[in-house]
Image (spheres, helix red, strand yellow):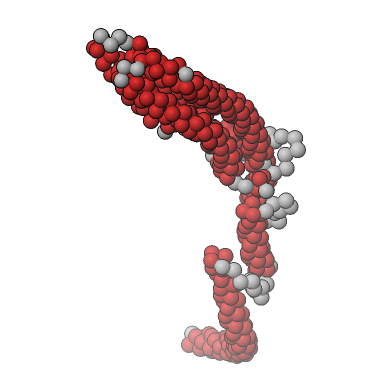
Amino acid sequence: MFSSMKIATRIGLGFAAVIALMLGLGGFAIYQMAHINDASSEIADNWMPSIRLVEEMNTNTSDLRIAELQFAHAESDQPHMAQRLERQQEEVLATFKKNRDGYVKLISSPEEKALYDEFSKKFETYLSMRDQSLALIRAGKSKDALALINGDAQKIYDEYSALLLQLVELNVKGGSTASITADRVYDDSRQMIFATLGLSLVLAVVFSVLIIRNLMRVLGGEPAVVAAVASQVAAGDLSVEVHTRPGDNGSAMLAMKTMVDKLKLVIEGQRTVVEAVNRGDFSVRVPLEGLAGFQRTMGEGLNDLAKTVGESTGDVVRVMGALSEGDLTMRIEKSYEGAFGEMSTYVNNTVARLASVVSEVNGAAEALAGASEEVSATAQALSQASSEQAAGVEETSASVEEMTSSIAQNTDNAKVTDG
């Protein structure tokens, strides 16, 4: 099926397949890079900020407790110090709340949510104890406040600090997992990309080889050589040597070689026929074996021309030969077209006219022969009459001579008598 396609279709399919693979590779790479980007974004936008915020929350609670202890140990005669420490606690607590609000938005798993909820409850309990200790300190009961701070409050502090550390570890673990996932996706993507590139390269080479081999099989040689041969043939140079590859049974080069060989046969046949015709031999024909298409048409046309000229010339020779022998009965019976038809008409008309003239001459000769016979008879009659007249004249002449002799004698006698 591939070998029966057009060259443009084959090349187009080959490039389309390679381009499809490259597009697929690009799409896969983009898809995998999106996964890597998601993992990186998750690390950068979730896990790392979560770790930072939880650690800051832990620091805030630690600072809050330190400030609380310092406030409990502050001397009553130092009101400014007490106010500063109380204000510091409020500032630390405000910072904690800000960090907590930011962290709550980043919670990404039920496990993390459960840990945070447990921490939140314990921290609220701690804040309630803090309010109690502050009230005791303001009431001047610093010892009771320190007992609360170092007792139950310390226990709660340790518990929620441990929960904060678990939250930090959980987020660190999540970040590590995301990093490992990104690395795995990267490795898988790289292997897939290399495999796809290798496959694309192999397919490109296979398609190139198939297309080149098919082109060479179709052309039968290098395109430049085929073009040069075709140019020489188109220019009418049939002396070009067309070389074909072994096993070639259907290439353009083989077709041109066959065409050149057959054209040589046709032209050689034409030359032979023309030379024979120039010698007056119309029996030679162009061999038609192995010719087809326009080559056979050319050969048949020249053969028909030689046949027509030969037959028309043969008819003229036959009629004129008979005419030279005095036979005016021969005619050109076959119907010809064009100048050949005019020539046959003129020959037939000439013979007909000659036959008519000869017929007229024969009639005149016969009439002349009859007249000659009549003249001969008249001449014979005249000759006979002349002969009879001559005899009469001879008799008359003899009579005259006798009369003359008699007269002369009488005269002589008279003279004698007178004397």
Q: Is residue 50 visible?
A: yes
Compare residues 249 and 116 and report the one nearer the observer.
116
State the residue lying farthest toward the right.
247
Pinpoint residue 387: horizontal percent, then vertical percent: 63, 87
Image quadrant where residue 142 sits? top left
Compare residues 253 and 335 and report the one nearer the observer.
253
Relative to 255, say whether 65 is above or below: above
Compare residues 277 and 215 and report the one nearer the observer.
215
Residue found at x 46% / y 31%: 121
Residue found at x 64% / y 60%: 304
Relative to 129, say whether 85 is above or below: above
Relative to 303, say whether 398 is above or below: below
Pinpoint residue 279: horizontal percent, then vertical percent: 65, 50
Image quadrant where residue 263 sits? top right
Q: How many numbered marks are there?
A: 0
Residue found at x 50% / y 31%: 118
Pinpoint residue 99: horizontal percent, then vertical percent: 38, 25
